[in-house]
Amino acid sequence: MTLSEFEIRRCEKLVAEFISKRRPPPHIRPQLDLAFRINGQSIEIFEVRPDWRDKNRTLEQPVAKATYNKRKLNWKILWQRADLKWHSYQPRPEVTSVEEFLDVVEHDEYGCFFG
């Protein structure tokens, strides 16, 4: 089940504020930027870079993901390992709000999200 329109707008606002604080300076953004998308019940934060083989294409490198579970009323926090699969973020695998998710990503105890 997907998020409601109200929940999507709220998530967009919160994540956009988080992204705007972490984005690199404007002169670096053509080479490295930060973005997000909301798809279904998931929020994904990712880096955007030009493809080194074809500068007209861009590549997305996942940073963090949160998926909402309406039955449990919580968000599952995930990070992508070198095997390109999403794994539970073990220091804090679940939170109850988007704000908590963004706080976990910001503090990143184990260096899983931004290295």
Image (cartoon, grey):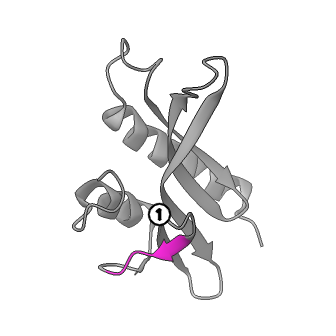
Q: Residue at x 54, y 26 (%)?
A: 52
Q: Is residue 4 above or below residue 67?
A: above
Residue 72 seen in this snapshot: yes
Residue 87 part of the magenta segment: yes
Residue 72 % position (x, y): 57, 88
Kindly identify which residue carries mark 1.
82
Q: Amino acid at mark 1?
A: Ala
Q: Residue at x 53, y 67 (%)?
A: 83
The boundaries of the magenta stretch are 86-90
Furthest-top residue in view? 27
Residue 93 % position (x, y): 41, 80
Q: In this image, 113 relative to 4: left or right? A: left
Q: In this image, 5 relative to 18: left or right? A: right
Residue 76 seen in this snapshot: no
Which sits in the foreground, 86 or 92? 86
Q: Is residue 59 above or below residue 93?
A: above
